[in-house]
């Protein structure tokens, strides 16, 4: 074998390896992109992180937002948590464990996305609220915040 031929062979191998690496990179990106868009439904982790940001940006004190949140709370939560969220709703009296006082620091100290997550997946005996829209669950988090005993935050 002439050294010229060897040299060409090596450069060809390098090119092939490089092309293969680039191809693999593109392939992986496509797969990741696919997985991400597939999992970007309202209950994925990506979405929950996004929820946190959006909640923080929403004007939580807007009367309209609170009104909507209150309506959702009255429809879905009040029977267990009570009007002020103290855990004294009629349906909650017979549950074990009893519903939390969601106006307490114990609940209020949790982040928006944690509360959003717990409302989404539920916490036995509290049922999950996956069927409520993404926006509804955000409104609920905002409303839960407005029930805080300690409104220092
Ligand atoms: C069937 C009764 C019931 C309903 C309806 C209900 N909850 Fe609960 N909730 C509970 C109980 C019981 C707990 C305590 C669960 C535990 O400790 O395992 C709880 C806990 C919570 C907590 C605190 C979770 C924690 O770990 O800090 C939040 C926040 C909450 N509920 C919000 C809501 C909201 C908002 C709704 C309405 C969309 C709702 N709940 C509807 C029974 C209920």
Image: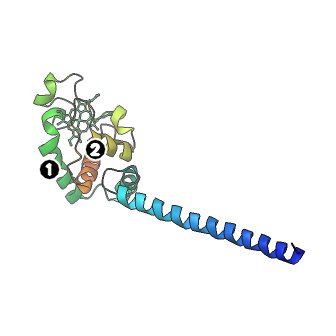
Front residue of 151 and 23: 23
Q: What kind of element bears circle 1?
A: helix
Q: Residue at x 67, y 70 (%)?
A: 16
Q: Residue at x 79, y 70 (%)?
A: 10
- The image quadrant of residue 58 is bottom left
The quarter of the picture where the N terminus appears is bottom right
Q: Earlier in the sequence, mark 1 or mark 2?
A: 1
Looking at the rendered structure, the number of numbered marks drawn on it comes to: 2
Labelled pair 1, 2 in contact (Cβ < 8 Å): no
Read off the residue under disc 2: 120
Picture coordinates of residue 139, whole percent (x, y): 25, 52
Q: Is residue 138 left or right of residue 82?
A: right
Percent position of residue 20, x then y: 62, 66
Residue 132: mark:
none
Residue 40 in picture, x, y percent from top left: 36, 57
Residue 106 is situated, as x and y percent measured from the top left of the image, at 36, 32
Category of crowding for the residue at label 2, using alpha-carbon neighbours closer than 10 angstroms: few (below 14), some (14–19), many (at least 20): many
For image coordinates 14% across by 22% down, the residue present is 94
């Amino acid at each position: 074998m002439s050294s010229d031929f060897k040299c060409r062979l090596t450069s060809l191998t390098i090119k092939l390896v490089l092309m293969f690496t680039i191809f693999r990179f593109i392939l992986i990106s496509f797969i990741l992109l696919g997985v991400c868009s597939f999992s970007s439904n309202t209950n994925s982790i990506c979405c929950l992180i996004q929820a946190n940001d959006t909640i923080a940006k929403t004007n939580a004190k807007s009367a309209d937002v609170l009104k909507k949140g209150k309506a959702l709370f009255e429809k879905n939560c009040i029977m267990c948590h009570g009007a002020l969220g103290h855990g004294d709703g009629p349906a909650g009296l017979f549950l074990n464990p009893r519903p939390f006082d969601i106006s307490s620091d114990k609940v209020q100290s949790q982040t928006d996305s944690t509360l959003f997550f717990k409302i989404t997946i539920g916490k036995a005996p509290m049922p999950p609220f996956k069927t409520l829209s993404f926006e509804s669950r955000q409104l609920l988090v905002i409303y839960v915040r407005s029930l805080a005993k300690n409104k220092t935050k």
